[in-house]
Amino acid sequence: MGSEKQVARLAEILVRHSVKAKRGEIVRISGNELSRPLALAVYREVLRAGAHPLPAVGFEDAGRIFFEEASGDQIRHLSPTRLYEAKRIDADIIILAPSNTRQLTHIPPKRMADRRKALQPISETLLRRVRWVLTNFPTEALAQECDRSLPEYERFYYRAVLQDWPAMAKLLRRAKRILDNSREVRIVGKETDLTFSIRGRKAIPCAGEYNMPDGEIFTGPVETSAEGKIFFEFPAIAGGREVSGIRLTFRKGKVVEATAERNEAYLREMLAADPGACRLGEFGIGANAGVTEFTRDILLDEKMGGTIHLAIGRSYPESGGRNRSAVHWDMIKDLRKEGELFLDRKPVLRTGHLFGRTPPGMRKRGQAP
């Protein structure tokens, strides 16, 4: 579980840097039984900040039991007490510590989509008014997902989270200025040539305020603008299902063709979940040099330096995105070995070259053809 010093340092980052807990505020600490060491360290740090900790610890198996047993009415039920709590807390620190990352793979996707729709008022309330941060606590299940022992995964994870976040913020502020003044994105790579507009949209730099680890910048594509095709080197995972070899073709912003080498039926079902699920809701660039390998955990993988990611479905309103959907599914494109990212025909990312910073041994390239 990492050293006590590492756990305490992460708790301090979550409370002081991420949600910036203030005296008198209510800070919810959401977790499960395996998150106990970090949850208690966060509890201690919240008290030291003068805020009021609100533990919300549940059982991981409860989610599986709910989807197995709940009736349609229960799936669609919106708890008034949970909505009330979302309207009253000031911050939410969410700790994920799964014992089994695949325990919902047998649940029909429609049941999970219907549940997401039912909980949307709570999600939107939290996004709109609450300072929140999401993190992992290393477990055997997370280590197994990326073929590591638990000690190896812990070393990898703490390297990704225990960073100089003010320095990351400085880098991303520069990236924001460039993105905010750009109109067109073009992604070129293996089986990929995709363009879309970000004109008038706002770039959101992420330096540890909402995710931990963090290290990305994202914005909302113009909903009707995507044209072309894209292949995703890494599997996309949702609801415990792994969909690999994804190829999407866009026309006028909409997915018109979708194939996958594995679990294609699930991909198509997700794209058909609602009218907004087949359009882009997010475009992001990974910038965390501590995340170097694919882990099958989007919390880390979308931050991987040298990659970009696109999400189908819901936009984040703060980016100016207008796409509405119960789905928000990130898919990662690797540009570290092959491919380039262009903004208004100028190259900004190629094999680690990000916004004018070229690693040793790399040279800049000319404009897009």
Image: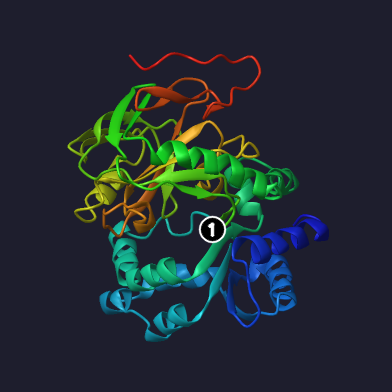
In percent of width and height, residue 187 lies at: 37, 27
Depth order, front residue of 9/71: 9
Depth order, front residue of 108/306: 306
In percent of width and height, residue 280 lies at: 29, 44
Who's the residue at 48% across and 71% down the image?
Answer: 130
Horizontal arrangement in the rendering, residue 1 relative to residue 92 (left or right): right
Depth order, front residue of 58/329: 329
Which of the 4 image quarters holds residue 105? bottom left
Per the image, the residue denoted by label 1 is 210
In percent of width and height, residue 214 lies at: 57, 49
Who's the residue at 70% across and 47% down the image?
Answer: 163
In percent of width and height, residue 252 lies at: 17, 37
**77 versus 237 height, above or below:** below
Does residue 243 appear anywhere in the picture? no
Who's the residue at 69% across and 60% down the image?
Answer: 13
Horizontal arrangement in the rendering, residue 96 relative to residue 319 (left or right): right
Who's the residue at 26% across and 54% down the image?
Answer: 322
Q: Which quadrant does the N terminus fall into?
A: bottom right
Does residue 126 appear anywhere in the picture? yes
Task: Please name the amino acid that badge 1 sits on.
Answer: Tyr
